[in-house]
Amino acid sequence: MTDKFLKQLNEYSSLTEEKMAEYLDNSGIPEDLSEVMKYSVMAGGKRLRPALVLSCSSLLGGKIEDAIPFAYAMEFIHTYSLIHDDLPALDNDDYRRGKLTSHKKFGEDKAILAGDALISFAFEIMLEACKNMNQTKAAMFISQAAGARGMVAGQWVDVKLNGQFVDEKTMEYIHLNKTAALIIGALKAGASCANAGEKDIEKMSAFGREIGYTFQIIDDILDVVGDSAELGKATGSDEANNKTTYVTLFGLENAKKEAERHTEIALEQLSEYGENAWFLRELAKYLLNRKK
Amino acid sequence: MTDKFLKQLNEYSSLTEEKMAEYLDNSGIPEDLSEVMKYSVMAGGKRLRPALVLSCSSLLGGKIEDAIPFAYAMEFIHTYSLIHDDLPALDNDDYRRGKLTSHKKFGEDKAILAGDALISFAFEIMLEACKNMNQTKAAMFISQAAGARGMVAGQWVDVKLNGQFVDEKTMEYIHLNKTAALIIGALKAGASCANAGEKDIEKMSAFGREIGYTFQIIDDILDVVGDSAELGKATGSDEANNKTTYVTLFGLENAKKEAERHTEIALEQLSEYGENAWFLRELAKYLLNRKK
């Protein structure tokens, strides 16, 4: 990774974190509820989805201030999904990013409500920020990505088939919805905030789908060969849960090749954007080569 | 209640139910997820919030087709909140409207996800329906009503103080947010779908607040004197849970008077709308006199 890329990623991340904390502190949300929301929101993470909203909007000529509310709304939605996924009735995880999960720290009742609060707040922020129909469309893209035909659908099928062998097609369905959908939604929202037309939105969507697959394949690989201290979570959980992954289906070597193939297709989507697309290009490579 | 009122309420309810079932069946949601969502959505109920959206929009000159998606989005949000409230970690209820609650029927994991799916789907439907900024604003009003400064805030404080004595001010905060907020949101959304101005939106909001209080006071009263078969749920749960209610604070007689007082103020808000506001007027009285 170039320093320029890491610096820009860091800038997007700082900007998002600053605004998220500000919003949660001065929102009129009951203080203790806002604390529980913040505990998970501010637990770190790559802030990948906000970076996608902001960089995509910027690439297509949008103003950063028009895209920012959509950037942290994405992070709130991502965080709500993690809080609910970690619950005892679902993945039953005690740690995330090296910290106790929300329900371990505050109790299940508060974790459920903090998740509910985060998804609602995400839509509130977006809708309060809408000044035109392209922004309304950006919120729509995000709702489609997050919902019962997107992320929740992926999580549903994953939960339903938990521990069973799944074929390649079903695994792809899960990943496309559980992981790639929000990434695609972030890019489409960023594009729409920049008043982009259908063609650009389509290109960004295709780019998102491919880096979404890459992201998930690398996740599967890191669960086998990653360093749990660096990852901030236990490795080997897929094997322990008898989970079908890219690695169990194709082996480590081929899984890595598959990730490379998806990254190639992702990069092809950017060909016509020239040098301006440098950040998304480097991001695609970063997701392929990440160690955590 | 006049026959005219009950007929109209029934028409709004049928229209909403028909559209909700249609949407859930033909949406591309995984079939078994859609079944779990439908189980709770189609469990009956007064369909009060959709009726508020539709009648308020109609009163202010709106077209019914512009308001309908917001009407059933409201019902999806209401239903998601019931599914999550019923969970073991929250109210731990086994029955609702005479049927097993979602988590008793399908398991906690599926109930959590069905709730998540319903709130997301509500925003998806609204945002896909938005053709202008007034509809975007309607979705915004609903997001504010449902969120961490609205319904979830009320539920949060209620859960936090569960079993403790609460003073009148805190109880009002809980009710204003947990119950009245969605009712207010429905009316503001209906008004906005009809392209209403600030003044009308304010009037409808004040009307909603007052019938919201009435609704909750009557709930408290019915929990003491209501018929559990007619209500479709157990009575006496407030006493069993040591809950502060209008009845425990003021006694049955005064609670009823308080409900009447709020209804009076509600009706005053409608004075300038003349005969056109007949449905909302009768609705306010219906909520005051309901037995279930």
Image (cartoon, coloured by chain):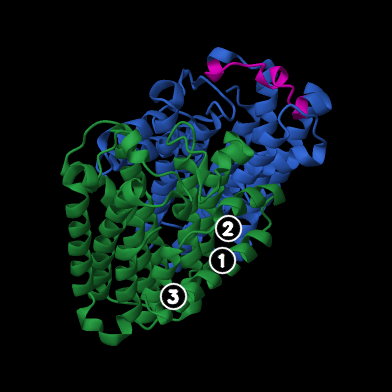
Chain colours: A green, B blue
Position of residue B88 in the picture relative to residue B76 (left or right)? right
Q: Where is residue B191 in the image (x, y as percent from the top left)?
A: 52, 56
Q: Quadrant of residue B35?
A: top left
Q: Mark 1 points at which residue?
A: A17
Q: In which quarter of the image is residue A132?
A: bottom left
Q: Which quarter of the figure is the N terminus of chain B placed in?
A: top right
Q: Which quarter of the figure is the C terminus of chain B placed in?
A: top right
User: Mark 2, chain letter?
Assistant: A
Q: Where is residue A146 in the image (x, y as percent from the top left)?
A: 38, 52
User: Mark 3, chain letter?
Assistant: A
Rendered position, B63 above or below A104: below
Rendered position, B25 above or below B255: below
Is residue A8 or residue B220 the one in the foreground? A8
Distance CA(mark 1)–CA(mark 2): 7 Å
Which residue type does callout 1 highlight? Glu
For label 1, the crowd category at 10 Å Cα-Cα, with few meaning under 14, some 14 to 19 and many 20 or more, is some
Q: Which mark is residue A6?
A: 3
Q: Is mark 3 on a helix, strand or loop?
A: helix
Which residue type does callout 3 highlight? Leu
Rendered position, A90 above or below B231: below
Q: Where is residue B239 in the image (x, y as percent from the top left)?
A: 72, 18
For label 3, the crowd category at 10 Å Cα-Cα, with few meaning under 14, some 14 to 19 and many 20 or more, is some
Q: In which quarter of the image is residue B252?
A: top right
Give the magenta range: B230-247
Q: Mark 2 points at which residue?
A: A42
Let me know if marks 3 and 1 both belong to one chain: yes
The residue positioned 48% from the left and 38% from the top of the image is A93
For label 2, the crowd category at 10 Å Cα-Cα, with few meaning under 14, some 14 to 19 and many 20 or more, is few
Is residue B232 or residue B211 the one in the foreground? B232
Which residue type does callout 2 highlight? Met
